[in-house]
Image: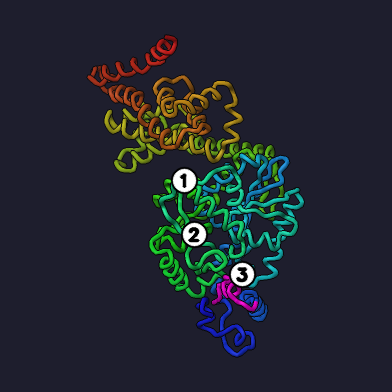
Amino acid sequence: MKECDFLQRTGNPKELAGGGAEYDPFECTLCGLCTAVCRLGVDPAAFFLERRRDLRAAKGADDPRHAPLIAYERRGTSRAYTFYGLPEHCSVVLFPGCALPGSRPDMVWNVYEELKRTVPALGIVLDCCLKPSHSLGRREEFGASFREITDYLLEKGIRKVLVACPNCQRIFSEYGGPLQVETVYEAFAGTPGALPANRSTTVVIHDPCVSREMKAMQDAVRELAGRRGLHVEEMKHARQRTRCCGRGGGVNFVRPKALEEAAASRAAEAAGRPIVTYCAACAETYRGTTATMHVLDLWLAPERAMAGKAKVSRAPFTYLNRLALKRRFRNSGHFVIMRERGGKEVTADATKRIKAGTILILIATAALLFRLAGGSQACNPEALKQMLQGHEILGPVVFILLYGITPVLFLPGLPMAIAAGLLFGPLWGVVYAITGATLGATASFLVARYLARDWVVAKLSGEMWQNLDQKVGEQGWKIVAITRLVPLFPFNVLNYAFGLTRIPFWHYVTASFLFMLPACIAFIVFSSSLPQLLKGEASPALFAGAALIVAVMLLPAWYKKRATT
């Protein structure tokens, strides 16, 4: 009772078990600290879990206070968020849980890639282990949903699950049957590596309460912290006697102050020393009170983690991150079998065919609708001029959007550039045209990188495009600059091709903007002088534009000569 705030408020376990006191079992965190310190071997945590189950069964419904937690779990087990990717000869999968894919999607991807060095045929499972339902006494819901996971994995020959979440470790260990369970911390600690001799920075480890009896995991986390040059000191409540962060058993939905109280207690024990933990929920609880880092952030990017600059997302962006991470795995090409909960298996080849067909239909439909709606006529300079009269603000916006659509739909951009000079003059024509051209190049790049990668790969499988990828890997944005200045490749196709390369997004956008600018200026300055030319007048803009166009057209010959010498 001295260790447990809940028992101090409600009474000793004997009184509660005998019905001598009224209490709410959902105010217990189920953390098990009472069990760990009891000299008589009494297990109050198990007792309060049973009381939760009994209370829910008596009501015949879930407690409305837990609705947000149940909705979170339901979303995590839906087809939209789940993904099973299995490569050929797969017998081991990574199960990162719910919180890490949302708060740290890049870290999950890097953990997967790191583990693949020792387990080449590693699969991925993005799903929820149903720990919330287990803790809330939803026995039937938990059993049915978790069995769907284990039955499928066993059917596919999976023998081992690598987990990153202590809650997942407990659930798979207790209910996973013949599946072997190991944490990624133990896997990383098992790789060769010595402890640095000089460990000047001191940290403390917060062991999540669910890991109370998991000594191998606790040791592995301390090993990883030590390998990153940190000196680990133990708090009073550590390992088997660790304290809960206030989220255990969904208590924070019943007693919101539990988080604040737990954070203050942990900060006091840390006494100014940074906290290292291996639970995303615990890290989120303590981050506002004292310096806190997740051990995987520390392991994969130690300098950023120690500086407090680890990239961590919070709701509602966590949900978008989970969807994006799922798409990233699905489009990675690592897996021969892919599946969502409740859905049929899809092979990689079938996925490519479906995606390619879908993209072709969408592009064809968009192009047809564009033409039927008069898009081709709208790109005519005279038609544009009539359409935009009297719309000084809306006109440029419409023009930029139309210009942005043309490269995505493989329509020629030169008429739009000429129209910019005729409609807006040399100055604003350049501003609007380069904005539209950059927007269109960016849209095509993003389509290739995230939405239609397989289809674009199939269309650009020649030696020329392989060389482009190799050169981008070697020289980065310089290749974008060269191909924008020197039209060696078709412009619209090039936009899609760069989406397949490893160039960073902002490098591509910046280089495209800067090095499309010379040709843009040349054609727009020239086209802006055409009305005067038709009247028999030769303006300075005519000669300047003509000279610029000649210079742009001579660039390929100059580049070819320079390359051969």
> Which mark's residue is nearer the viewer, 1 or 2?
1
Judged from the image, the secondary structure of the residue bearing numbered disc 2 is strand
Q: Is residue 44 toward the left or the right of residue 496 in the image?
A: right
Q: Tell me if residue 369 comes above or below residue 134 in the rendering.
A: above
Measured as percent of width and height from the top left, residue 150 is found at 72, 56
The residue segment tinted magenta is: 27-40
For this rendering, which residue is in front, 402 or 516?
516
Q: Quadrant of residue 465?
A: top right
Q: Amino acid at mark 2?
A: Ile
Residue shown at 60% from the left, 34% from the top: 455
Of the numbered discs in the image, which one, if any, rests on residue 312? none
Packing grade of label 1 (10 A; few <14, some 14-19, many >=20) is few
Residue on which disc 3 sits: 135
Judged from the image, the secondary structure of the residue bearing numbered disc 1 is loop
Whether residue 355 is visible, yes or no, is: yes
Packing grade of label 2 (10 A; few <14, some 14-19, many >=20) is many
Viewport quadrant of the C terminus: top left
Q: Gap between marks 3 and 2, in whole Å?
A: 25 Å
Q: Amino acid at mark 3?
A: Ser
> Which mark's residue is nearer the viewer, 3 or 2?
2
> Which mark's residue is nearer the viewer, 3 or 1?
1
Which colour style is shown? rainbow
Of the numbered discs in the image, which one, if any, rests on residue 205? 2
Mark 3 or 1 closer to N-term? Answer: 3
Report how many numbered discs are placed on residues in the image: 3
